[in-house]
Image (tube, grey):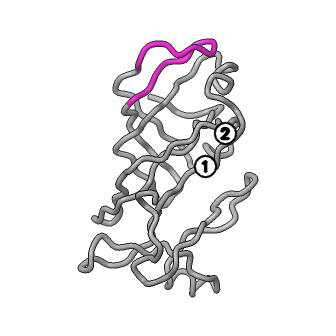
């Protein structure tokens, strides 16, 4: 069982797969009982709380992109100059649709070849714009244990997925 997979959320709702984006189109959102009722939808099983003293809020469990068909070397082949980000840390997302993350492990890529490690870098952008700039997805797939912090609470989640190639992304 993946670390963020729970049979039932903290409202007693059975967890199910939520396809947020399918074929490049936003399909559905994670919700809890309250938000689902306001939308006239069925709850998705994403009402989670850190512990019994905490309020239930809408939270991810294992959120990732489905694998594609390319090997990592094929995905990198067409990159003239870019970066390979293997892990990020200290990220945050905002209600206005922006995100930022620090790069924990990353490498400079030149003409499809992985070069020297990068230090002290971060990535930022608009979520929907960045997702629309994905032009390739690898078949390599890995999900690892992680923690999601929201509203002063922390819950265990699965993080990872395939490698994705993004044609434009702010790196600094």
Q: Secondary structure at mark 1?
A: loop
Q: Mark 1 and mark 2 in contact (Cβ < 8 Å)?
A: yes
**Looking at the image, which is closer to me, 82 or 142?**
142
Percent of width and height locating residue 23: 76, 53
Would you say residue 107 sits in the magenta stretch? yes
Q: Is residue 144 above or below residue 164?
A: below
Percent of width and height locating residue 168: 62, 32
Query: Which residue corresponds to the image point at 68% horizontal and 45% vertical from the top-left?
Result: 132
Q: Secondary structure at mark 2?
A: strand
Q: Earlier in the sequence, mark 2 or mark 1?
A: 1
Query: Which residue corresponds to the image point at 27% horizontal and 74% vertical from the top-left?
Result: 51
Q: Is residue 24 left or right of residue 108?
A: right
Mark sitting on residue 65: 1
Q: Which residue is mark 2?
A: 134
Q: Mark 2 packing: few (<14 Cα in 10 Å), some, or many (20+)? A: some
Region rendered in magenta = 105-117
Query: Which quadrant holds the C terminus?
Result: top left
**Looking at the image, which is closer to me, 19 or 119?**
19
């Amino acid at each position: 069982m993946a670390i963020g997979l729970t049979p039932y959320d903290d409202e007693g709702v059975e967890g199910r797969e939520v396809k947020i984006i399918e074929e490049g189109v936003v399909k559905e959102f994670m919700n809890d009982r309250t938000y689902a009722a306001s939308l006239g939808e069925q709850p998705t099983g994403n009402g989670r709380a850190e512990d019994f003293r905490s309020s239930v809020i809408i939270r991810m469990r294992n959120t990732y992109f489905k694998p594609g068909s390319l090997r990592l070397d094929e995905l990198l082949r067409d990159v003239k100059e870019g970066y390979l980000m293997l892990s990020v840390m200290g990220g945050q997302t905002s209600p206005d649709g922006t995100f930022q993350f620090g790069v924990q492990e990353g490498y400079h890529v030149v003409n499809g070849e992985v070069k020297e490690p990068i230090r002290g870098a971060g990535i930022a952008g608009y979520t929907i714009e960045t997702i629309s700039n994905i032009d390739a997805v690898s078949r390599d797939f890995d999900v690892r244990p992680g923690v999601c912090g929201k509203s002063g609470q922390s819950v265990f989640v699965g993080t990872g997925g395939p490698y994705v190639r993004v044609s434009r992304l702010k790196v600094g």
